[in-house]
Structure formats: C-alpha cells, structure tokens
Image: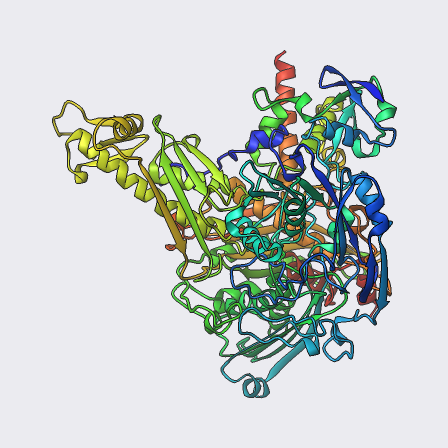
Amino acid sequence: MKINFNINSESKNLDVKSNETLLEVLRNNGYTEVKCGCNEGECGACLVLLDGKPVNSCQVLAMSVRNKEIKTVKGIGTLFSPHIIQKIFAKVGADQCGFCSPGMVIASYSLLKENPNPTYIEIVEGLDGNLCRCTGYVKIIEAVEESAELINKRIKAE
Amino acid sequence: MFNYVNKPIEKIDGLALVTGNEFYTDDFNFKGMLHVSILHSGFAHAIIEDLDDSAARKIPGVIEVLYYKNVNQILYTTAGQGYPEPSPYDTFLFGKVMRFIGDNVCAVAAETKEIADAALKKIKVKYKRLKPVLDFEKAENSKVIIHKEDGAFPKIPVFYDASKNLPAKVEANVGNFDDAYQNSSKKIEQTFYTPYASHCAIEPHTSVSYIDNRGRLVIISSTQVPFHVRRIVSHVAEIPISQIRVIKPRIGGGFGGKQEVLLEPIVALITWKTKRPAKLSLSRKEVFKSTRTRHQFRTIFRVGYEDNGKINAFHLDALENSGGYGSHALTVLSNAGSKTLPLLNKIENIRFTGKSVYTNLPCGGAYRGYGATEAYFGFGQIIDMICENTKLDIIEYYKKWSIKSGETSPIFKALGEGKEGVAMTITSTSLEQCLDTGAKDFNWYEKRNIYGPNSALNKNNRYKKGVGMAALMQGSGIPEIDMASAYIKMNDDGSFNLHVGATDIGTGSDTILAQIAAEVLDTPVEKIIVNSSDTDNTPFDVGAYASSTTYLSGKAVQKCAEKVKAQILKVGSEILNLSLDKIEIKNNKVVLKKSGIQQERSEISFEDICRYAFYQNNQFQIQATASHVSPKSPPPFAAHFAEIEVDTFTGIIKVLNYLAAVDCGTPINITLAEGQTEGAIVNGMAYALFEDYYFSPSGKLLNDTFGKYGMFTAGDVPPIKVKLIESYEETGPFGAKSISEININGPLPAIANAFYNATGKRLFKAPFIPEYVLNILNS
C-alpha cells in the first residue's frame, strides 16, 4: 500500500506493508541514518521525531503514522550544514563508534527544544532511552550541556 | 613539543558520524540480495540425528539451506587471531553436535528476511539429547565429554585434552612457591568469581557479501579483524584468498565481540554457491546467546607474606568457563596471569595455574580486558587485604612494590600466549605519579580518615560510605607476533593518502594514525586522507585487538611517514640545489634550516615538490610502505579510586565518585584517550554491579535483551574524573602506549575495596547485586 509521509520536510509516497515498522520503512527507503540496535525499543538507536516528539521507530507501525511529519538525524542537520548539537557532539568526542549518535542527537535536540536550560538530572533523564557502550555517556552529557549553553547564548543575543 | 599529536583533535569521521552520513554494514544493500536467518539449537547438548529441509525448500522464495549435510565438515576456530591460532580447531560452521543453546543448526537464505524466518519453522530436526554440562566447576571430571570424537585439535603445540573437557591448561612457575608459602608468617587463601558478560556493542553483528564484476567474492563485515576474516573464510568456505576481498566499513563498537569470525563464512558460502548477494544481520537476542561473551572465571589466590607486607609467595589459580567452544580459551586464560602478576614484580616465588573447561553454555571469547579484568577482581582485593592485615597504606604499598622503569618481571618471559613469553624491561611508567595525583585529587586520605566500618559516620547508619582503590596494568599489542603496516603516497596538492590495514571500530584509530602521519610530515591532519581496512587496497594489519592499534599500527605509520619525509627532502634538495643537511620540513614546506644562506628561492611548498616529482625531472611517485612488529608490549598503568555508598537496607551500592589516573605514555589524541577511559570504566562498573548471564536449569539464557541485561544508561553514571599522567615510551609512536583495555579492570576491585571500607565485609562474587550484597552484610 502506498502511504504519504513527510520525511525531513519532503513529502514522500512510500510502499508500506501492513506489518512493517516505521524503522523498516525508513531503512528500506534509504534513510539508513536511522539505526537498528535491538528492534525492541530498548536502545534508542532508531529514535526519530514524529510530529516533533521522539519515538523509537522500531516500535511504531508505519501504517499508523500516515501523513505525519518525521524527522531523522539528517532532518536536524547534515554533513554540510550540521546543527550546533552535532558540531558539539563531534567537537567534544561524544561520538566514538557513532552507531548510537543519530539517536543521541535526536534525544538531545528534543530535550533542548522542550527545555533549553536543563539541569544535569534533566539531561540524563532526557538521554535515558538511549544506550551507548563506547563513551560511558560522560562526553555525551558534556555535549548536551555545552550545546545548551551555546543555544542559550544565541537566544539571548537574538 | 608536538604539533598534531598529544592534542584533542576532532575525529576525522566525527561530523559524518553524528549526521548519520557514515555507512555501517547493514546500510549496504544490493540488487537481488538474499536474506539469511539462522536456526539455533534449543538444546544445550544434542546430536542432530537427521535434518529434513524439504518442507522449507518448498516455500516460494527460499533459495538455499546450509547445514551439516551440504557444508563440508572443516574444523576451525572462530577466534580472529594470528596464524596459526592459539585457539583449538574445534568448531564446524554447521556441525552435527549442538554444544550450547544458540549453537548453529542451519542457515536459510531467502528472497526476504520474512521468508527466511518462516522457513526456519519448517526445518525438521531430529535431535538426540545428551546430558549437558552446566556447572563449569564440575566440567573437568564430568563423564559427559563435550568434544567427543569430532577430531578437534590444537593448531599449535599446546596442551589440549578433549577427554577431560579441557581446551587449555597453563602453568608457569617462578622460584619455589610451596616452600615460600609454607615459610610465610601470614597467609591468605581466597576464592573469587566473575560472571559472563555481553559486549553490548550497539551495532549487532552483520555481514553482507556479493560477487564483483570479475567474479570475486566481496565481504563487507562488522569485524575487528578483516585480514583474519579473509584467511579464515578461505579455509572454511574453501575459496582461494585471491578470490576474497574483505571490507570493513564503519563499525558500531566491538570490545572484542567482533574479533570472531562467525557470520562471514555463512554469507560467503551462500554468495559463492548462488552467485547472489547475501546479508546476515543478527537480532539482539542472537547476539546475546549465540555470539561470544566474556568468560566466566573462578580465581583462587594463595598468598604468603610477612608483617612488613613483603609477599613471599603468590599463587593464582584460574578456572575459565570456555562454553561450547574454545575460542580465545588459552590466551584469555594466560592473560589472567600475564597482565596481573608482573605488577608487583618483587615477588620471588610465583605460581600461575590455569585451566579452561568446555561446558554446554554460551562461548567465551575476546572481551576488553581479556582475562586481566577477571583476575584483577581478586588481585586488587588481595593487596587491600594484605595492607589491612599489616596496617600498611595501600598507596605507599603499591608505590613500593610495583614494577619500575628499568625493572623487569620473570612473568613476562614465563607466561606467553601459547608459548614462552617475551622478556622485557619497563622503559616507561608514571604509576607512582598516578597513585599520588589520583590520591590527592580524590581526597583519598581525607576520605579514608572519615570512612571505615566503625567510623562515627558509618556506624549505626543505614547508608555507609567507603573508598577503595586498585592499581592496574595491561599490555600494548602482542610482542613478536602481531604485525601492522602502512602505505603513504603523496598527491599533487601536497595531500597524502594513508592506507592502513588497522581497523577503526569506533576507537578513532583512523584519526590517531592521521595525526601520527601529520606529525612526521608536519602537515595539517586534514591533508592526510585515510583509507583503512580493505584487504584489496590496504596493507596487512592484524586488526583491532590486544590494545595494539595506536602502539603498533601507529609505529608502522610513523616509520612509513619518515620514509616519505626523506623522499620529500630529497626532491626539495634537488629543486633548491642545497644539501640535505641544510633543509628541513616545516608546515607543509621544505625550508632552509636557518636563515643566512643567500639564495633566491629559500623554500618550496609540498605542492610544488609533488608537481616536480610528477612532471618535471627524475619523475617518480613519492610513496613508501612500512611494517612494524614490536619486540615488547609495554604496559600502560593506572590507579583507580572509587567512593561508594551502601544502602544496608536494600543492598544497593551506589558509586558516588570515581577517578582514574592513567599512564598511556603520550596520549596521541587527548579527547579520544579520555573517551576510551570513561567508556571502559562505565562498562567495568556495570559489570561489577549488574551485568551477568542468568540461565534456566536447561542452560537457556534468560536475560537476553538490553532491558533484562542491565547495561548502564546515562543516569547510572557517577561523576568520573580522568587524569592522563603522561610517560614517554621510547618504542611507541611519539611515546605512546595503549589505553583501550586497562581501565575496564579497575571498577571490580576498587568498588569491592570501597565496600570493605564502608562495611568491613568483602565481596567475593561479582556482580554485586542487592541480594548478594544483603547476604554478605547479614553473614
């Protein structure tokens, strides 16, 4: 069945089977930046924004989100036009193997959008659904703190 | 002192990673690609009497089924090690005997994953169930023999006795342990247990294969060891090495789990047979149960010492649960001794005895720390016990008795990997400074004074606080065995292609190796274009293991870049018409060493040098290759400090603060060295407090999901301080040693010692889950 989605601000008409998850549909259509770490909603590697809210795309049936707005990490920023969170992630070393990074960036983006001034506890709660084995989370938390600071500076300057 | 190394440089793939631009194995798809699913044994020990795939083959879309009847029965080891491997050849890709729940029964390749999964349900297997061995302490004397008449054999001349379920046995003796132990005035004998663990790389194991335009087999794989994959696939799938190309794209973490050749021969056989691309990507549950794990260990320490703390006799006896197959059985076992016992090198009488046993449980393999983590749990507590019993200060104790620069340990020679080890003298250590700086920054002595089981703060308090520490060492590569190489060529804009077999699995080695080349060539890191881990167009490297890449591959890159530098200078001298002693390389140019020489042209850019070499006179390609084997494995050192709070009502241990002071020689990339340390500590902490494998009475893994397994999330992480205390290792590139493994060894002993400081009781069995902690508190 063909279904309409809005993915990273582009309207798309994609083939979807009734039992396919949003993760499968995205990956099968070239959105390989959405990663699959467990397919059980436990690692957050497949996190995307669905109408602005972060969801594990492996836990969403694609049919159920027709006409909705989906943002992957490339909808946040791209190699040639990275978002400030992505720049900071790379700068402070919050990326090691990078497999959790797309999900981590989405979680951080979503957290800072809701709450541009998070406390430490709010940051770790915001990242609670995302697993990382490489970094021990230390530099990821640092990246969120530093991103918040820069975003706030920018808001103040405006 | 340095321009491009010893700096916190951003990873060269950093932005591409965080924007989702990089490709991992599962991101590769090919037209007409088959999808592979594996049927795993549901029995811990069974013989397949018959397998009927006819119903499965009738399903439309099923293309191939691989199992013992149509796959040649070739023994190999899944351990991706150097050749000949020190692990026994005891594994068939698809055999008739199932040796653990998760062992491979057969593989189905179909047009879609859905069809392949459906076909698995139509495979009819007639099993003859055998009694399983599920208790590793009873495996050696069991009447049940796990590798019976399968022809399994050791590839190198080492002990191997399948009739006793022993894939490996190691013994090393220095001095006379028995006499010295008997004559010691004080003695400790204590047994410790460490559990299974999963690596939990977020990327599951995945392999993709296809036939290229000229009929060769290409394998893209999530591997730490592309060259070993090529060799082992050739052996198992009986395809000539010349017909195989292995490519490692970005890897989503390894930690040793991807040092195993598990999936590659399967997709290779399917593609080779069908001439169609094939993909096999494991589910998380499959990764937990059917890939490799950290070996479960029992360690027994017998130590004789004197009132002044001098250890006369030290015996470490290790029993390792290898599971169904002996992957890394011998070498992990050896490292339990060789990476711990040299730390206190003044002990004159040392015995190391170790046995690895087969059981019908999941298989062990390489896991960050590689035996050292398992042994340091007891080792670090034994030293704490000696200090406690002799009223000695543990920091001063380690400073007094630990190995120093210019010193050696007889263990280096006595205990190798399947053969005699390599004698070496320590030429770099800052362990004393690590101990001092760590203690100072952690407020160690202040906290030691306040805490303690009988302190005013802890006595009669539900929440008890304590601090504990441990000193550690590891190695840097496998001496005289592991080889790395590099190739560099110069381009006509003054940039360089750096080709390395070294395998960046998320560690950042591509960046580190670029920094090393940049330092030698005095050119920005951006000018170094890195191409790594492709068996067709990068030179050989053993791969990412044994804490070797920075130290070993880094040295190969340094040597290679030096050769290129010499060629650049030679061309520069020709153009400038000056002798070599008058010129040098500086910031992308060849320049005069000192001003004063009157000359029209006093410098020449790399760009002009390469253009000259390409097009003008005496034309040639500026290029070089270099290989490196290390004569030694210089240990990194570390001092770890933990502050914890024990809730004596619930048994929950909370880590309040953690500090690691680490000597990795020169940290080539400061950010990445810190990141390696933080990641290893958090993995080690989760291993100390939560991570374990829980089995049903029939040997089925019960906690086979992230949710049930319990790796740490961001909220579980306490404040962690990392102090890099540099030393300079003359045999490493720009003074570097290693850092990737050592820091996973600290949390077990440091937290256990902190628990003793808080409660006066000791934890002998990891993980320190609340039930166990309460049992200990109430004992």
Residue B326, placed above or below residue B119 = below
Question: Which of the pair B624/B220 is nearer the observer?
Answer: B220
Residue B522 picture location, percent across and down: 34, 35
Residue B194 picture location, percent across and down: 70, 64
Residue B619 location, quadrant? top left
Q: Which residue is located at x 40 percent, y 53 percent?
A: B628
- Residue lying farthest to the left in this orientation: B598
Question: Which of the pair B86/B650 is nearer the observer?
Answer: B86
Q: How is the image coloured?
A: rainbow
Question: Which of the pair B559/B613 is nearer the observer?
Answer: B613
Residue B111 location, quadrant? top right
- Residue lying farthest to the top in this orientation: A158
Which of the image's four quarters has the N terminus of chain B?
top left
Q: How many marks?
A: 0
Question: Which of the pair B164/B447 is nearer the observer?
Answer: B164
Q: Is residue B691 visible?
A: no
Residue B705 picture location, percent across and down: 80, 48
Q: Is residue B138 visible?
A: yes
Which of the image's four quarters has the C terminus of chain B?
bottom right
Q: Which residue is located at x 63 percent, y 26 percent?
A: A85
Residue A8 picture location, percent across and down: 71, 19
Q: Which residue is located at x 72 percent, y 15 percent?
A: A10
Residue B666, placed above or below residue B755 = above
Residue B108, placed above or below residue B152 = above
- Left or right: residue B372 versus residue B146 is left
